[in-house]
Image (cartoon, rainbow, N blue to C red):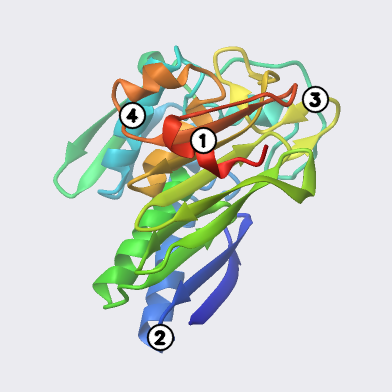
């Protein structure tokens, strides 16, 4: 097996393939990741979405924005507004800004996704419109989508045995299952279980991943602007990483049964008091 490792979009990546990636494929991966970052990063003043933070308006996004924004539409509805891609300014108010100041001020709810934004496909582009200044943050599902895009690129290049790992968001294809440890959210030297991953995606989210100050972290209820406290970590198995990533975020805010009405997935959800709930298929993966 061959590994390609690099840092991008604020996390460490490892791509594992049966055969080493040819130079043109490596270049294509780098170009894809850079294009995604240049489109969506709220930390870059030159990103496509940056002008929306200053004034209401319209930006043109790539075709891949359509499934991403459609997923946000659904998760926003199923979480009663807690998942909202306009949460960027709320994160900035708590100190998670482009300068990484970590200097918190009073929490601020995000603009309503339905009230302040709309989108439509226009030819090969997606037009995103906002009616007020708003900072887009697609972190709830964007990293998972980028994993899928890189995975699809590698499959198209002939790599049928591949794992894409972007800092706890994974997509796998191959004959042998990958054994993935579920990191304990309060002790990175321990695992709460091991999940066999084959031909699916596994994404996890934890409040300790980006935490600062007293009770401050990056998983906010967009309707209040406050960090969630009841849930400590979630993991989701699904067919693709974008869905798994978005559902892992949504599980901080809503009941799994509500999500299961519209999505097929398996999950583990660990609460701040140490309790864990899980889907039937995950019962055997947790340590007792």
> x, y percentage for residue 115?
38, 13
The mark found on residue 60 in the picture is: none
- Of residues 275 and 143, the one nearer the viewer is 275
Q: Which residue is drawn at 65% across and 16% down?
A: 108
Q: Quick one: SS at disc 1?
A: helix
Up/down of 141 relative to 3, above or below: above
Q: Is residue 234 left or right of residue 70?
A: right
Q: Which residue is tagged 4?
A: 129
Mark 4 or 1, closer to the camera: 1
- Of residues 58 and 195, the one nearer the viewer is 195
Up/down of 63 relative to 175, above or below: above
The mark found on residue 19 in the picture is: 2
Work out whether mark 4 precedes mark 2 in sequence or the reverse, and give the earlier one: 2
Disc 4 to disc 1, C-alpha distance: 43 Å
Mark 2 or 3, closer to the camera: 2
Disc 2 to disc 3, C-alpha distance: 44 Å
Mark 4 or 2, closer to the camera: 2
Q: Which residue is drawn at 75% across and 43% down?
A: 100
Q: Residue at x 18, y 50 (%)?
A: 124
Q: Which residue is tagged 1?
A: 283
Q: Quick one: SS at disc 3?
A: loop
């Amino acid at each position: 097996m061959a590994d390609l490792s690099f840092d991008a979009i604020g996390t460490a990546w490892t791509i594992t393939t049966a055969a080493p990636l040819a130079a043109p494929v490596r270049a294509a991966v780098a170009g894809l990741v850079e294009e995604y970052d240049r489109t969506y990063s709220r930390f870059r003043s030159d990103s496509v979405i940056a002008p929306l933070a200053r004034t209401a308006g319209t930006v043109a996004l790539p075709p891949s924005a359509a499934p991403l924004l459609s997923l946000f539409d659904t998760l926003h509805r199923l979480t009663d507004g807690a998942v909202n891609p306009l949460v960027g300014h709320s994160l900035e108010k708590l100190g998670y800004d482009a300068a990484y100041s970590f200097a918190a001020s009073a929490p601020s709810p995000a603009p309503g996704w339905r009230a302040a934004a709309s989108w439509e496909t226009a030819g090969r582009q997606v037009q995103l419109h906002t009616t007020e200044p708003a900072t887009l943050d697609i972190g709830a599902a964007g990293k998972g989508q980028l994993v899928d895009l890189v995975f699809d690129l590698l499959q198209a290049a002939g790599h049928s045995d591949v794992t894409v790992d972007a800092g706890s968001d994974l997509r796998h294809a191959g004959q042998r299952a990958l054994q993935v440890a579920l990191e304990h959210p309060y002790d990175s030297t321990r695992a709460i279980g091991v999940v066999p991953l084959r031909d699916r995606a596994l994404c996890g989210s934890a409040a300790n991943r980006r935490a600062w100050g007293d009770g401050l972290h990056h998983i906010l209820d967009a309707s209040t602007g406050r960090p969630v406290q009841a849930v400590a970590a979630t993991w989701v198995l699904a067919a693709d990483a974008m869905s798994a990533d978005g559902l892992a975020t949504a599980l901080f805010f809503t009941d799994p049964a509500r999500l299961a009405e519209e999505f097929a997935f398996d999950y583990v959800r660990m609460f701040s008091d140490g309790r864990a709930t899980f889907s039937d298929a995950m019962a055997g993966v947790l340590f007792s």
